[in-house]
Amino acid sequence: MKLFKARLRPSLPHLAGEAPASFVSRLAQLHLGRDASAPFFCADMGLDFRGIIDGDQDAVDALASLAGVDPDRLAADAFRRVPDGQTFRTELFPGRHLLRTALRVCPACLLEDCAQASKPETAAYGRALWSIAAIKTCRKHGMALVKLEHQETSRNHDFARLLKPHLPDLGALSERATCRTASSLETYVLDRLDEGRGNIHWLDTLPLHVGIGVCETIGAVARFGRDVRFNTLSDDDWCAAGTTGIAIAEKGEVGIREFMDGLVCSYPYTRSATEGPQAVLGRWFKVLSFEKLHPDFDVVRDLVAEFIAERMPFGPGDTIFGKPVQRRVLHSVYTASQELRIHPKRLRKILQATGILTKEQAELPNGSALFDAVAASPTLADAADGLFMTEVKEYLGAGRVQTKLLVDGGFIKPMFPKRPELDHLFRRRDLDTFLTRLFADAVPVAEPDEDMVDIQRAVKKVCCSTAEILDLVLGRKLAWVGRRRDAHGFSALLVRVSEVRDRTRGSMDGCTTARAVEKVMRTNSAVVRKLIDLGFLQTTTIVSPLNRCPVNVIREADLEAFRAEHVTLFEAMATTGIHFRQIQKRLTALGIEPQIRREEVGAAFYRRSDLARI
């Protein structure tokens, strides 16, 4: 062991863990009279007391040289003032983490110091660790540190002088002191200061003061609630909070996220559920957001900000801890409705129809019904771009009736045709596609002639339907399609009446009317109607080529088939030259009866094969 020669005689040894200010204070008690004072002693010895308090290297070295102690050991127990606070054993402690002006002691430690001392005020010394706010318990004695009151605020760092009046009471103080085991956080802090690490990986990657702040805050919130008031907590409460905080931090970032997840899931949301992280995360968020914390806390802020962005509906335009959110992960029904300016009820229906909101989510309030913003972006774009039926007619430039015809004809389709509550909502891009197809080959027209008319007038002139004309236009079956320059949308479409009439004119080829059948069969209309009603003749409906109205016709093939098998006596008379009465007498004589009786249809029809027998 290296020996250091003291210039001061007598001197005192520097004791384990003793703060330099305590050491010089004991020297003052040793050498000065009844009113001994460390500042006066330093002035007499040419020492810088303020420098010793602040850990100034020259001041500490001068003290070590005067007292003949190891300057490195003395400096190791010094708090060194830096711009951001004070450092102790390589760890930074901002001001809020230190209680250097408070007289906090372990009575049991001081009793041991004084046990064999003839002059107790020179034996009892202040441990540097007692100035760290997070240390509230003496690990050696399992005893809570006791705060001693004094009136000499101007001599806050003169430990021996301030302690001297309390020396007779140390026994009583020790008996009254709370007995408790050092908390997990205190143990971690002590281990880290002694060994440089505390064997908790995530905390070891953080500056110690950040780890202390994190553990105390999350522990207090986890143990005493998200709205805990720190100024109401006792030292026992803080020790319990520290133990809880360490248990959470031992899991690293996963543990912090689980802790915050618990706050999110347990929050008593209002009916709207629009509460933000300040309400949900409570004091944990407020500490990180509003207290003047060291920049070292930014790594924790980033972790919390990332969690908030992943678990709460935040996106571009929002800020967390003063930093803008770059991308959106989640939307809620509320935030999406606000962003898109869509009523939340309408948005809910759309999200449910597309399966983005599950049945369970659909029962949650608007602010709690969360969904993947990226996966839902196409649906949200459609929702923002959607038009109601009343808006569609204006957008297409069509009237109410024509718009309904377009929907009924399937030319424009709603977003959700199978959901009655949404069958009136249309995608704007679908309407744009329809209009683009409609006017793909349209010729701009300033002054249309008499043959150029819009769809509505063409329907009346040609006696056809809107759907028929649209099928011709969209199927590119018309040689000419126009577009009025002074009109908008659907109403601007022009077609030629003559061309539409030619394209929609029906044909009677292969068909005949009931009137024509009367003449061919040499009978009357009543008989023909009976034949049709009883199914002897089959009819079909076609569009009349004359007036575009539906008309019932008989296919010529069906008529010929009927006539090939059946014949009236008048027809037989025309082909045989025998009077119909003679034909009837001969058939009766042969016992041949009509195939279709007069009582059934108003005329008798015989088989042609039977007529061959006469």
Image (cartoon, rainbow, N blue to C red):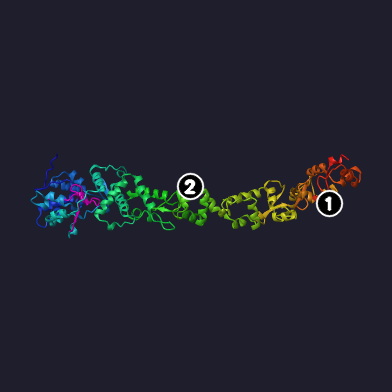
- Position of the N terminus by quadrant: top left
Residue positioned most to the left? 118
Q: Which residue is mark 1?
A: 524
226 with respect to 57 (left or right): right
Q: Secondary structure at mark 1?
A: loop
409 with respect to 514 (left or right): left
151 with respect to 454 (left or right): left
Question: Picture coordinates of residue 310 (x, y %)?
Answer: 42, 48
Q: Is residue 127 magenta?
A: yes
Question: Picture coordinates of residue 263 (x, y %)?
Answer: 37, 52
608 with respect to 454 (left or right): right
Q: Which residue is mark 2?
A: 374
Q: Is residue 609 visible?
A: yes
In the image, the segment drawn in magenta is 123-149
Q: Is residue 241 above or below residue 565?
A: below
Identified by mark 1, the residue type is: Asn
Question: Picture coordinates of residue 400 (x, y %)?
Answer: 64, 58
Q: Is residue 17 magenta?
A: no
Label 1 and label 2: CA atoms lie apart by 76 Å
